[in-house]
Image (cartoon, rainbow, N blue to C red):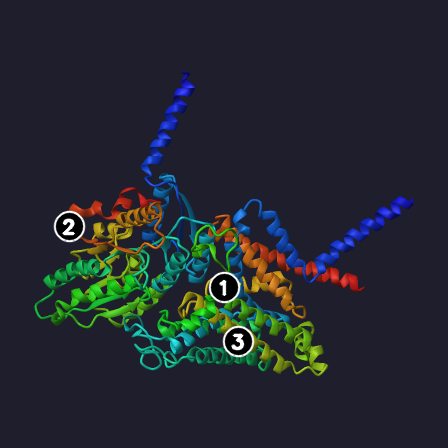
Amino acid sequence: MTRTKLLAAAATAALIGVGSAGGAQAATICFAFQDLETEFWIAGHKAITTTLTEAGHTVIERNANEDANRQFEQVRDCIAQGVDGIILIPQDGESAVTIVAEAQDNDVPIAVFNRPPSDLSRGIVVVADNAAIAEQAVDYLVEEALAAAPAGETLTPLIVVGDLGDPNAVGRKEGFYAAIEKHADRFATPIEVASEWDAATALANLEAAVTANPDIDLLFTSSDFLFPTIRSVLEPRGMWKRRGEEGHVLMGGLDGDATACQLIKEGYVDATGVQDLYFEAESAMDAILAAIEAGEAQPNQVIEDPGFALTAANLGEREMDMWGCVLLSEGFLRN
Amino acid sequence: MHSTVKAAKTKRSLGARAADVFLSDYFVLYMSLAYVAVLAPFLPVLLAPANLSNVLSNMWPLLVVAVGQTFVLAIAGIDLSQGAVVGLTSVVGAMLIATMADPVVLANAPVWGLVLTESGGPFGQMEWGFLLGIAVMVAVAAAIGAANGASVAVFGMPPFMVTLVGLISVGALAIYLTQSENIRHLPDAYVMLGKGDIASVHLGPKDTPQIPRRQIHSFVTYPMLIAIAVALLAHLLLAKTVFGKWVLAIGVNRKAAELSGVPVRRVVVLVFVISAVCAALAAVLYSARLEAGRPTLGEGNFLLDVIGAVVIGGTSLFGGKAKIVWTVFGVLFFVLLSNTLNLMNLSSFQIDMVKGGVILAAALLDVLRTRLMRERMR
């Protein structure tokens, strides 16, 4: 056998190996997402497309550019193209219900990644337990706030709320209130700032809220992607301080992105609720591939990501469990 | 000598024939067919029944809005508020006809408790309540259109500025009413208007006793009937009535139309009313297919799609030249373009760039066609 033939045989063996590592036979998956405007979605998109492609599957990507009608049409195009399955990041919970029904009515299995439909009874739904994760993060902030405040002083909390059409935003708000209400006697009625998951809206509303209430003790944002916006409001007012500095506002968020990781390390942010992005992406892919393999056209399953809270106190032990810290260590924010 | 003359005649005749096709009412239809013929060998799924069914399904709501925009462009105007009217009327309709509502999502909305409660909207429990809801949607749209038209016709304000303000303020009102939330739980009869089949087809052999739903394709649908009815009425109005002639006369030369006794102000107001009412009817189709009233419907690149489709069809941005059949073909080409770009797996950014380029090319073609027509008339 010549050297060339040997190399060819080795390459073939390697390819067979890769194919079997993929598990199910090669499938065509439509990955329809609403946009890639935050670190979470970018990392989720990368994890899903890279893993599927490396396992030998074909990925058809559809970016709806935040247009629910366009996403609906794109998914129907995918169905017409004869895809084997669909992974969906919907624009909101309502459009997700319609799109899941459309896919299932056409016998195409569909998995919804991270942003759940308003009705969880249809489709594979991979979702973080937003209320529990938010509660864990805010519990930490509350303990820190109570420890630092003189006895009897009433503290002022503020929450930046997401788009309440998104069940994730609703869960995060519920988690925040659950933590605050455990010590209702020590906290004033929380100030709610609407963001609609939009940085410009959050900026305008937060500026108004902070101007009207400059004595905020605790701030929770429903998504980490708003920390740069929060900084641009607090910094000019002398409220962007590190832990231990006079005037530090206790701050927490949810997502677990690279910016939050860096800000916790620098001391500006105290805690963040972490969604296990890699677990969620893997669960969505595994479930959809299993349904395709089994020939199941309408799989219905809710897969819950329990998540956790990364805090200034447990940073040393759990840092590398948070996807944002992994990205940070790989130089994500240097790009 | 004889053969040279014959060759010249043939050449001239070919050129004249090409010009005939270029100036024909059916030019964009021919272009669409040629486009499909060129791409079909590379994109076999393009002619698959499921894909053709999708193309048609995506065409109907856009056609309804584009028909309204055709009237406005015909008077040398523009209506930028159509998208916002779609959003507002979808919300207004949904809050009236919803069969139930979630207080967790909507309790902060100003309409909560006034119009919308946990048991839905005031018409939500009526059997034909959705028709009342649609009537209110049309009335709201007509009021917005009348305000736009009056501002242009009576106060002489530029349509671009008036409707830009409409786009911002009407859009903001839609978001304010629900605090940016969507209203779900629309009646089944209403949802049928956006996605209901009247006749479906299955092409090919029947391999299994139960034909899979995926192999059954929508053929005649409610949105198809609604869109065709709107287009037909609009065609009659524009092509067969005095009103239509007035519209085109205003687009050619407003001053001359005024001097000829055309009631310019009344016609301009009516044109903007037609545009807004078409937007409201499209809102019915869009909100029904998505099964929710959405304040953000009509945002983003929606206007690009609407104006682009009308301009591609051949309606002049300078006014005075418009036909509904052109708009039908323009919408067909535009939807085909979007569909094929999707099938090529291009990103949404690349798709929008190509669409922009095609619209620019269509505007350029319009200039060339106008020039060619003038030369022929001499």
Label 1, on which residue?
B302
Pointers 1 and 2 in contact (C-beta within 8 Å): no
Residue B133: where, in percent of width, then height? 44, 78
Front position in the image: B66 or A285: A285
Mark 1 or mark 3: whose residue is earlier in sequence: 3
Chain where mark 1 sits: B
Which residue does the image show at 55% across and 55% down from the upper left?
Answer: B337
Residue B87: where, in percent of width, then height? 44, 70
Label 3, on which residue?
B277
Q: Secondary structure at mark 3?
A: helix
Which residue does the image show at 44% across and 52% down from the upper left?
Answer: B208
Above/below status of A99 relative to A277? below
- Same chain letter for marks 2 and 3: no
Above/below status of B362 relative to B90? above
Residue B60: where, in percent of width, then height? 53, 65
- Same chain letter for marks 1 and 2: no
Q: Amino acid at mark 1?
A: Phe
Residue B372: where, in percent of width, then height? 74, 59
Q: Residues within 10 Å of mark 2 (few under 14, many from 20)?
A: few
Hey, which residue is sitting farthest left in the picture? Answer: A151
Label 2, on which residue?
A314
- Position of B234 compared to B346: left or right? right
Q: Amino acid at mark 2?
A: Asn
Q: Can the viewer see residue A211 in this picture?
A: yes
Q: Gap in Å between the C-alphas at discs 1 and 3?
A: 17 Å
Which residue does the image show at 36% across and 55% down from the upper left?
Answer: A89
Callout count:
3
Front position in the image: B82 or B121: B121
Nearest-to-viewer mark from 1 and 2: 1
Q: Can you tell which quarter of the image residue B30 is in? A: bottom right
Above/below status of A275 relative to B97? above
